Amino acid sequence: MKINWYPGHMAKTKRLMQEDIRQIDLVCELLDARIPWASRNPDLSALAGQKKRIIVLNRADQADLQRTEGWKDYFKKQGFPVIALDSQNGGGYGEFLPLVRQVMAQQIARNEEKGLKGKSIRIMACGIPNVGKSSFINRILGRRSAVAQDRPGVTRQKQWFALKGGVELMDTPGMLWPKIEDEETGLMLAFTGTINDEILELEELACHLIDTLCQQAPGALEKRYKVESTADKPSYDVLEELARARGFLQAGGYCNTERMARVLLDEFRSGKLGRITLQPPPEDAHE
């Protein structure tokens, strides 16, 4: 299932980021903790250049705790400061500004030596669509200032926000890259709602999600939908079984698999299937 989605406003976002990066001190890269690898935009390294970077594993409350720790270890070994945030309950948010000041300590000291004490640190927050940037900003601010919705592409223009301690944060629209070469990456992005559902064949996507859940979160479907083991069964047969378990039947007793596909995707995205990370960290992350 080959997936690509790159509407015109994303190309505009990339151009604006290239222009704005000159006035930025620090790049905050938000990743989806359920799919850390797939949610990394390969264009960002070139855009960020030599700017310092912080990685935020957002939606960690929906991800497997042990795997999140593994991903934190992995990124730290790559030289990136990293924190994991609980977007539902606010866990980890108190670490963000202290981490910013720690990462930028040398620049803050240089500013003070030059008589520029109090000069703002400017941060660019960036990430793929629907990674939770607006909710992240609202939590950091302690108030509702950025529009947050559970669908991709809500933020369409940059916005500046003043944080505590002389920090300014630029919110940028969610951005993908022009061509998603890797099929698994495209699927992961579609599973989590990064890709607009309107361009997807949802029953096929749900079947791919079933296969992935059976590999990465065995037992999750059985626990949620009270069905027998789904292991080693064709994914469409499992989708029909889930539809029957939910009572999604049409005239003649046929299963409404289209409805079940939407429910399965919605319940995975909202965390109702449990704390699930679809991409495990590299095996050497804890070594």
Image: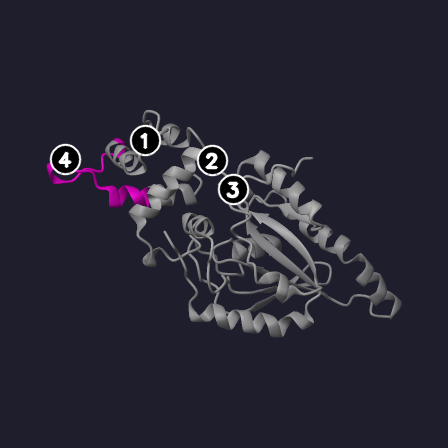
Q: Give the range drawn in magenta.
A: 245-263
Query: In this figure, which residue is indicated by the disc labeled 3?
Result: 279
User: Which disc number belongs to residue 233?
Assistant: 1
Q: Are marks 1 and 3 in contact (CB under 8 Å)?
A: no
Mark 1 and mark 3: Cα distance apart in space = 22 Å
Mark 4 and mark 2: Cα distance apart in space = 32 Å
Residue 29 position in % (x across, y down): 61, 56
**Nearer mark to the viewer, of 1 and 3:** 1
Circle 3: residue type: Gln
Residue 151 position in % (x across, y down): 42, 56
User: Which disc number belongs to residue 209?
Assistant: none
Q: Do the residues labelled 2 and 3 touch (CB within 8 Å)?
A: yes
- Give the mark nearest the N terminus, 2 or 3: 2
Q: How crowded is mark 3: few (under 14 residues within 10 Å), some or many (20 or more)?
A: some
Mark 2 and mark 3: Cα distance apart in space = 8 Å
**Nearer mark to the viewer, of 4 and 2:** 2
